[in-house]
Amino acid sequence: MVKRSFVFLCLAIMTLAAPAFALQPPAGQTEFVPISQLPPAEQLPAAPLLVGAYAFVWLGLMVYMWSIWRRLGKVEADMRALERRGSKGSSVR
Amino acid sequence: MRKLFAPLLIVTAAMFVYAPVMIAQAPYESTMLLIQKIFYFHVPSWIAMYGAIFVCGIESAIFLFRRKPSAERVASAAAELAVLFGLFGLVTGPLWGRKAWGVWWQWDARLTTSLLLELIFVGYLLVRKYGGPGSDKLAAAIGIFGMANVPFVYKSVDIWRTVHPQTSVVPLLLTSAPGMAAPFAFCAMAFILLLVLLLALRVGLEHQRAALDQLYLAEE
């Protein structure tokens, strides 16, 4: 009986202590690791960042050109409307 | 300028189409490898922004001291382009920094002063749009103040300790890495031509708006 209780107690302690052992921090890094030798999981891919940068500039330029074109169109439409109004006013007089 | 506009548009478009080919053929930098190629659009964006700021500052001074309304229109157009090219620099920089430095942003002297310069010109545009009567003079003063900040932003990397490379890096390219210097010069020229082109378009819009205002005033 005593022997069985002792085994049960040991098992219980091991079960409870297991997560604590699992959560122990890894041993501290003692030397410099070049970025090219990092494990694949820790490496940040360059291509999406590079493509993102160039795509942002291209898209930004296109949106800006479109906004200028739209604003020019609006001003020209206002001018035409004003001219039409002016010609109608002079014909009424 | 109208005669030059079409050839300028064709040359600039051709340069922007050919730029990726030159960038792809440029040699890799030994430590940063692929991500360093952001350099070919990042630095020219800042060159174009500084160019736009100088145009804005000089035209603002002409407007304030000589009372030329056309100068105010050019300054206003240039301020908008300064914000556009500054935005390109502020977005491409963190994308490069995330890989090269491990962080998106660092509150160091160069990055912070660049952000403040961008905000000064955003302020210029806000004053010009919502400031009401007399805002043109206030905006012109902001334009001159913004231009006065450029040397501090440029030299900040040499004066203070920052993570950003110093100003000597770009001149060194010409001697140490001719393979990188040619695509860089090509992209810088493409951005300068783009600045001239967009400025011409934007100034044209400002002139048309001024003509429209005159028509409204004549009608009243």
Image (tube, coloured by chain):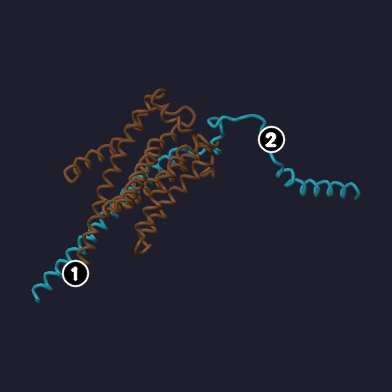
Chain colours: A cyan, B brown
Residues B123 and B149: in front is: B149
Q: Name the amino acid type tagged 1.
A: Glu
Residue drawn at point x = 81 percent, y = 48 percent? A13
Chain under label 1? B
Q: Is residue A77 left or right of residue B179?
A: left
Viewer-side residue, B23 vs B68: B68
Which residue is at a point 47% across and 49% down the rendered structure image?
B116
Picture quadrant where residue B23 is located? top left
Task: Give the crowd class for mark 2: few <14, some 14-19, many >=20 residues within 10 Å.
Answer: few
Which residue position is annotated with label 2? A28
**Which is nearer the eye, B7 or B168?**
B168
Q: Name the residue under label 1.
A: B219
Query: Is B205 on the left-hand or right-hand side of B124?
Result: left
Q: Which amino acid does label 2 sit on?
A: Gly
Comparing marks 2 and 1, which lies closer to the viewer?
1
Please report, as a chain letter, where disc 2 is located. Answer: A
Note whether B20 is above or below B123 in the view shown.
above
Q: Marks 2 and 1, Cα distance to the nearest angstrom?
A: 80 Å
Direction from residue B44 to residue B32 in the image, left or right? right
Q: Measuring from the top left, give residue B200's x and y in whole percent.
A: 25, 47
